Amino acid sequence: MTKEPFDQPRLAINRVYTRQGDSGETALVGGQRVPKDGTRIAAYGTVDELNSFLGAARATVGELALAEPRLALLAAILLRVQHELFNLGSILATLPEDVHPRQPRVTDAEILQLETEMDLMNEDVAPLRSFVLPGGSRLDAELHIGRTVCRRAERMVVALSRAESVPPETIRYLNRLSDALFVWSRWAGHISGAPETLWEPNQSASGQPDNR
């Protein structure tokens, strides 16, 4: 039997509040106390925010899959990604010198899996002739919210990497995940029959006949 690559969590959450953060500081995995508005905290906090949005999208997919079972594939993918985001957050919450060899993280395997899933789903959708406006369905909007929050998380990690050491896989993963969320939104719309609204510059107020 293959040994699990990462250690299991060693947590004992008996009480949620500790009052230790009331002064505006929080603790990293290694025990260091740092300001809550620091770049490292903002980076893994945004990853946590992304995880919450993906949880909402997964709940929506689960409801839709009752009528369209093919969407269950996306629900399973989103659940896996949520686990991966916690793994990513674990590394971001740890200073490089405190990282354990079997500490959860994202690796090239997770990035390759995203690429494989994107390639397969892209085969089912028509080529694009313009950008897509979010909102073809509730799920489409939720996945696009996830995509944009993922881009923000990526920017925060890039900012962190300019000041401190960050595993390069974290940036590559977030970059690939934002692309994947776009592909998944198109694929889910295709499978469920939701309309896809493309960007048309002349649908703006300036493009209307009465305003010319």
Image: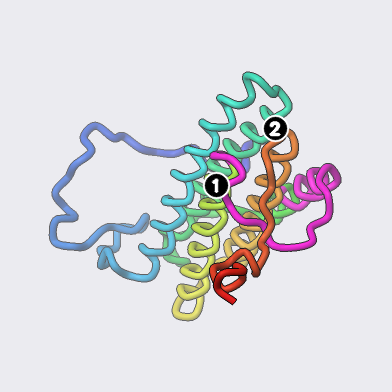
130 falls in the magenta region: yes
Disc sitting over residue 60 in the figure: none
Q: Residue at x 53, y 59 (%)?
A: 148
Above or below 64: residue 38 = below
Which amino acid is tagged 1?
Ala
| Start-end of magenta stretch | 114-139
| Residue where numbered disc 2 is placed | 192
4 falls in the magenta region: no
Is 126 situated left or right of 28 in this image? right
Mark 1, Cα crowd under 10 Å, few <14 / some 14-19 / many 20+, is: some
Q: Residue at x 83, y 55 (%)?
A: 127
Q: Nearer the viewer, residue 16 or 70?
A: 70
Disc sitting over residue 141 in the figure: 1
The image quadrant where one finds the C terminus is bottom right
Above or below 57: residue 183 = below
Q: Residue at x 34, y 58 (%)?
A: 28
Q: Secondary structure at mark 1?
A: helix
Mark 2, Cα crowd under 10 Å, few <14 / some 14-19 / many 20+, is: some
Q: Nearer the viewer, residue 130 or 53?
A: 130
Image x and y of residue 172, in percent = 64, 64
The image quadrant where one finds the N terminus is top right
Q: CA distance from mark 2 to mark 1?
A: 14 Å
